[in-house]
Image: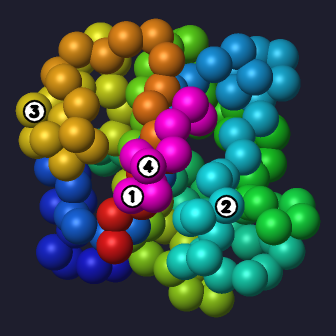
């Protein structure tokens, strides 16, 4: 575990490590529970077909299965569902997944859950205002837009 990762820090600060974000839609929730990773983040993830990932939010941890499907990663639906239900996630909630540790043996994400307002520290890093609207933005540095929020900081 990276001791400088602000683990347990609820202030919303990002650590500067790679991350991706998403605004939850129906497909991420009941009944599908499908969360695919943007292809850009797969460049920093281990190239294994199936691995256990740890999602950390505040003081809780969830083991979820990470699977590669073609060139995109996703969470196993059953374990992703458990995280969704435990955190009472709903359509329109924003999630920021920071890659805290990434080796062949260990994959860990710190998950920031954003409801209603984006904390100023995160909004500044994402280049958005503090109030969130319904749709996502994409700012991958290449000027693309129109996708659900996918932002990679290296």
60 is within the stretch colored magenta: no
**In the rendering, which numbered label is found on residue 78?**
none
The spot of residue 150 in percent (x, y) is: 50, 46
The quadrant of the rendering that contains the N terminus is: bottom left
- State the CA–CA distance, disc 3 to disc 4: 23 Å
Q: Pinpoint residue 48: horizontal percent, then vertical percent.
A: 78, 80
Left or right relative to 56: residue 103:
right
- Name the mark nearer the viewer: 1 or 3: 1
**Does the CB distance between marks 1 and 3 fall below 8 Å?**
no
How crowded pointer 3 is (Cα within 10 Å; few <14, some 14-19, many 20+) is rated as some
Q: For numbered disc 4, what is the local secondary structure?
A: loop
Q: Which residues are magenta?
A: 139-148
Secondary structure, mark 3, is helix
Where is mark 1, residue-wise?
141
Residue under pointer 2: 39
Q: Residue at x 44, y 49 (%)?
A: 143
Residue at (19% x, 48% y) in the render: 125
**Precedes in sequence: disc 1 or disc 3:** 3
Residue closer to the observer: 29 or 70: 70
Mark 1 secondary-structure assignment: loop
Which residue is denoted by mark 3 in the rendering?
Answer: 120
Q: Are marks 4 and 1 in contact (CB under 8 Å)?
A: yes
Q: Residue 143, labelled with which disc?
A: 4
Cα distance, mark 1 to mark 3? Answer: 21 Å
Q: Is residue 9 depicted above or below 67 in this figure?
A: above
Image depth: mark 1 or mark 2 in front = 1
Q: Secondary structure at mark 2?
A: helix
Residue ID at (69%, 27%): 28
């Amino acid at each position: 575990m990276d001791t400088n990762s602000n683990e347990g820090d609820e202030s919303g600060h990002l650590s500067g490590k790679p991350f991706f974000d998403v605004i939850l839609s129906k497909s991420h929730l009941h009944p599908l529970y499908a969360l695919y990773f943007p292809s850009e983040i797969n460049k920093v993830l281990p190239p294994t077909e199936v691995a256990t990932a740890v999602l950390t939010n505040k003081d809780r941890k969830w083991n979820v299965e990470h699977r590669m499907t073609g060139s995109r990663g996703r969470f196993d639906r059953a374990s992703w569902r458990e995280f969704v239900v435990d955190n009472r996630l709903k359509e329109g909630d924003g999630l920021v997944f920071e890659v805290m540790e990434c080796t062949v043996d260990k994959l860990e994400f710190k998950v920031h859950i954003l409801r209603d307002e984006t904390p100023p520290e995160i909004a500044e890093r994402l280049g958005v205002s503090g109030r969130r609207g319904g749709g996502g933005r994409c700012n991958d540095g290449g000027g693309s837009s129109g996708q659900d929020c996918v932002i990679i900081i290296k």
